[in-house]
Amino acid sequence: MRRFLFYFYSLFQLVNDLSKRVLITGISGFVGPLLAKKLLSLGYEVYGFYKRRADGYVPIRLRLLGLHNSIKLIEGDLSIMSSVIASLRESEPDVVFHLGAQSFVPRSFKDPIETYHVNTMGTIYLLEGIRLLDLDSKFIFAGSSEEYGLQFIDKRHYQAMKEKYGIIYPEPEKLPELPIDENNPLRPLSPYATSKVHGDFSTRNYYYSYGIKGIVSRAFNHEGPGRGPEFVTSAIVIQVLELIYGKRDYLRIGNVNAFRDWSHVNDVIDAYILLSEKGNPGDVYVVGSRRTNSVLSFILLTLKEFGYITEKLETLDGSITVKDPIEECGEKFFGLNFFKTKVDCMLLQGELEFELKHKGIKLYTSKGTVTVKFDPSKFRPSDVPILLSNPEKIMSLGWRINHSLSDIIKDQVAYYSDMELRKSIKPK
Ligand code: GDP
């Protein structure tokens, strides 16, 4: 019996030693819980660093995903060095996935100092903690496509931006600057973006200066179940749900001309895990969908998900009309073939641009008209006009894009239908 117990104990120890320990910052955010769930299913031991709450509650997303008992939660604050170091000492991680940040661009304009405290100092405290505690951890830094900021589509775009900003630095070496890879110039346009540039450079500097095994992922926008309601994809999905359930009469939105490279969050999670296994320390990897679509298309495609097929759109001042705006457009842009709509193509070709003076857009759909009003408060002091990734480098490590734009919309609709509305409102 004693021998049996000894073997059992040794086996238990072996499994324990083999299972990798990870520390995830931002465990109560959008990506953190989903990454934790995946890592747990792969046999990792997961520690989650989350911000202290006065009410003592475990963050809701962890409870909803049933993770609160399987993750070892560590309370702390990224902007306080001692708590960051304590979390590293407690978890002694093989890998740190540093996702924790103030990640909403408009909030960073309102309170830049908060963003810098959390994003820049939080990153430095983690890197410094790994160094001071002499840990051998890999450090995956969640950088962002926002670091690239302004990237030029063509000469006309370059000249318009030069007029707007007075100076462009660095000057482009080629036009178009799309798709974006690891070598594109960084021209961050918000406090959030500059804070991520700081983390990106610091991660690499800690590799060069101290040999810390930091790897930078520059993930483009990622969406899906759990995406915060303040981001445009969720803002659209929630408003469309409210409209359909009779809780609002029109949609309110900001800049619909903006193009984003929207990935499904599960693809990005695969990328983070892959980088922790195969990424080169000191190196940078672009993670994106290799697609770009306009905010306007996201609205039209979300409505389509509910059977509202837009047959025609017209600006509220009547000056612009487009027929069949969601017809698929097969044209190649920037040497790439990707899914896009007719309005995407018209916007990319410069044949179309929506401005505040147009007041909004009326959509004539198969289920009646839908009004979209432009809300001046949703426009930003400076906005990134277009993002489109070239993720070939991480693909060469074996990463694949598994989800379409339609998968993202479907999952986000399902999430918000369940979460926010189904219980509280009745269909019209
Ligand atoms: P970001 O790319 O990290 O800033 O992600 P967001 O989802 O916050 O914004 C994406 C784009 O949508 C930006 O160009 C915004 O200007 C644009 N946008 C238009 N209307 C809205 C809105 O109501 N909310 C947000 N968050 N963005 C909007």
Image (cartoon, rainbow, N blue to C red):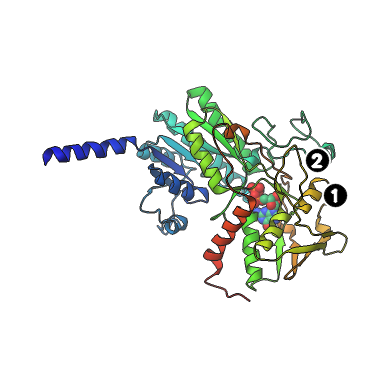
How many labels sit on residues? Answer: 2
Can residue 106 be seen here? The reply is no
- Residue located 19% across and 37% down the image: 7
As helix, strand or loop, the secondary structure at mark 1 comes to loop
Q: Is residue 321 left or right of residue 412?
A: right
Tell me if mark 2 has few (under 14), some (14-19) or many (20+) residues whose alpha carbon lies within 10 angstroms of its own. Answer: some
Q: Is the residue under label 1 in contact with that under label 2 (CB below 8 Å)?
A: no
Q: Residue 414: where, in percent of width, then height?
A: 56, 61
- The crowding category of the residue bearing disc 1, from other C-alpha atoms within 10 Å (few below 14, some 14 to 19, many at least 20), is few
Type of amino acid at the residue the image marks with label 1: Glu
Q: Is the residue indicated by label 2 positioned so its CB lies within 8 Å of ligand 1?
A: no
Indicate which disc residue 351 carries: 1
Mark 2 → mark 1, Cα distance in angstroms: 18 Å
345 relative position to 209: left or right: right
Give the numbered dot on residue 161: 2
Q: Quadrant of residue 428?
A: bottom right
Residue 292 at x, y percent in the picture: 70, 46
Does residue 256 sit above or below 395 in this rendering?
Answer: below
Q: Nearer the viewer, residue 187 or 63?
A: 63
Is residue 266 at all visible to an observer of this figure? yes
Amino acid type at circle 2 is Met
Q: Secondary structure at mark 2?
A: helix
Which numbered disc, 2 or 1, marks the residue closer to the eye?
1
